[in-house]
Image (spheres, grey):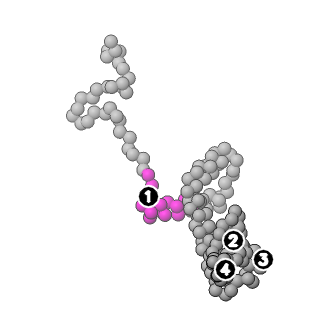
């Protein structure tokens, strides 16, 4: 069997022999499947042989798994922006979080942190801030514009 996407439908095509006069295969459209819900059209299942039904079920299951994976990948890729949106909504006072919501959210953040660490992405730490013009031990310090000028040094 062959599956051919046409807009929001997937056509189910089946080989039904060879026409010697026309010198080509006889391929019949048995029915169609909705792309998003994977629901077969009326009469499709009745027109198929047992082997073709098995192949159709396998195709539908594969498509459902692929759709689920796409959905999960999209959710993962958009997680950072959604967290920022939630933070902005709370800051603006548009959303009043409850204790249960806060507990669930903190638990989800902890699970995300653990998964990120396992994947090799540890939490970023702030680097200790060094004074850019601080002298090294034993070195005389020179003010290069960062330190306020004293009246004696201004000429």
Q: How many numbered dots are placed on residues in this image?
A: 4
Does the magenta-highlighted stretch encompass residue 83?
no
Residue 20, image x, y percentages = 64, 81
From the image, state whether disc 3 or disc 1 is nearer to you. Answer: 3
Comparing 107 with 17, the one in front is 17
User: Which residues are drawn in magenta?
Assistant: 108-124
Give the residue at x 64% y 86%.
Answer: 51
Q: Earlier in the sequence, mark 2 or mark 3?
A: 2
Circle 2 or circle 3, nearest the eye = 2
Q: Earlier in the sequence, mark 2 or mark 1?
A: 2
Residue 121: numbered disc? 1
Main secondary structure found in the magenta portion: helix
Between marks 4 and 3, how big is the CA–CA gap? 33 Å
Magenta stretch holds residue 112? yes
Please tell me the numbered disc located at residue 42.
3
Q: CA distance from mark 4 to mark 1?
A: 65 Å
Residue farthest along the bottom direction in this orientation: 50
| Residue 44 seen | yes
Q: Nearer the viewer, mark 2 or mark 1?
A: 2
Q: Circle 2 sits on which residue?
A: 11
Q: Is residue 72 above or below residue 55?
A: above
């Amino acid at each position: 069997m062959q599956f051919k996407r046409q807009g929001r439908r997937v056509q189910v095509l089946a080989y039904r022999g060879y026409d010697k006069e026309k010198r080509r295969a006889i391929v019949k459209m048995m029915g169609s499947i909705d792309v998003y819900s994977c629901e077969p059209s009326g009469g499709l299942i009745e027109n198929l042989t047992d082997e073709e039904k098995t192949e159709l079920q396998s195709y539908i299951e594969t498509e459902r798994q692929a759709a689920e994976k796409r959905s999960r990948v999209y959710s993962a890729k958009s997680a950072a922006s959604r967290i920022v949106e939630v933070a902005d909504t709370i800051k603006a006072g548009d959303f009043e979080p409850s204790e249960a919501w806060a507990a669930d959210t903190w638990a989800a953040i902890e699970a995300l942190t653990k998964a990120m660490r396992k994947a090799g992405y540890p939490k970023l730490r702030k680097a200790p801030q060094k004074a850019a013009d601080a002298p090294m031990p034993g070195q005389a310090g020179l003010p290069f514009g960062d330190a306020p000028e004293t009246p004696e040094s201004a000429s």
